[in-house]
Amino acid sequence: MTSTTPKKVRVPDLALMKQRGDRIVMLTAYDATMARLLDRAGIDLLLVGDSLGNVIMGLDTTIPVTLDVMIHHTRAVARGANRALVVADMPFLTYQVSPEQATRNATRLFQEGGAAAVKLEGGRAIADTVRKLTAAGLPVMGHLGLTPQHVHRLGGMRQQARSESAAHELILDALALEDAGAFAIVLEAIPDTVAEAVTSQLKIPTIGIGAGSHCDGQVLVSYDVLGLFDTFAPPFAKQYAQLGQVIVRAAKDYANDVREGLFPKSTLSNQQTSDLAGRRVIPSLNDRAFEELNCARVPVR
């Protein structure tokens, strides 16, 4: 089933999609080529996630990812995307210090990176910052549940909102983000029932990742979907291809052809090769052309 929004996706379109019951599709992208391919597939939103710290940079967490790195990758994705809405993660400690700091850094993602929206992790603690950004005209997506930038405080990458009280707190966070002007919220690694309760209470759409089927949309890391990242596979992710295996096989075939002298193949016929065998193909320094070049030089005075 193809997207029902063939034109370029804008922030207001997501609320309309929720109203119509159209499922929102989001995947991560980190470069122009992947963005172009996913855009061609009809993906609604491309998230330039700080997950690039894991799948691109080989880091254990997203915490070391810097704003400059995010701007670099966002700019590449924005160049490759035609239809999809490009959302950029604000990395660790680029928005938590103050609303002014957040505005300054978010502005760079829009102006230098070409983002159409930014995503922030956290609930009521960052509601004032979200309000400040949206008041300045910068679209903000929220992120609740498992928030990878808080991995040390959470004690690891584990499911959140498992108790009744924790679920209640998450709902209050979601309502606060909506009130502050967020246009959508990612719900990560929470029980299906909690995600359903949040989704039903919000006017803005929810996008789930490991949060069941009751959200208004779904997001996954593209490297998980395509089978490119084999270090760790989240239990909630589904592999739709094993491109990692395809790449290894192609690289082995290429290496074998080079070592066996099968690549590259000559484009000349045997007769042409024979004709060239005794001929000087590369001009020497005594060629007329070189002499003329020498004569044309401006004398040094």
Image: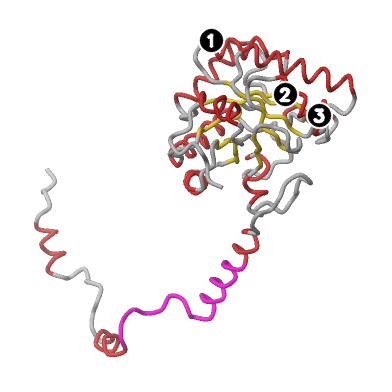
Verify whether residue 190 appears in magenta.
no
The residue shown at (83%, 35%) is 158
Give the total of numbered labels: 3
Secondary structure under the numbered disc 2 in the rendered image = helix
Q: Nearer the viewer, mark 3 or mark 2?
A: 2
Query: Looking at the image, do the residues carrying marks 1 and 2 touch, with CB atoms under 8 Å apart?
Result: no
- The one of 135 and 148 positioned closer to us in this rendering: 135
Q: Choose top left, top right, bottom left or bottom right for residue 30.
A: top right
Judged from the image, the secondary structure of the residue bearing numbered disc 1 is helix
Q: Judging from the image, what secondary structure is the residue with disc 3 in?
A: helix
Sequence-earlier tag: 3 or 2: 3
What's the distance in space between the residues labelled 1 and 2, CA to CA? 26 Å
User: What type is the residue that disc 2 sits on?
Assistant: Ser
Q: In 3D space, how far apart are the residues under numbered discs 1 and 3 (Cα atoms)?
A: 32 Å
Q: Which residues are magenta?
A: 249-269
Residue at which label 1 appears: 135
- Judge whether residue 251 is colored magenta: yes
For residue 200, the mark is 2
Determine which quarter of the picture holds residue 159.
Answer: top right
Please name which of the two marks, 1 or 3, marks the residue nearer to the observer.
Answer: 1
In whole angstroms, how far apart are the C-alphas of marks 3 and 2?
31 Å
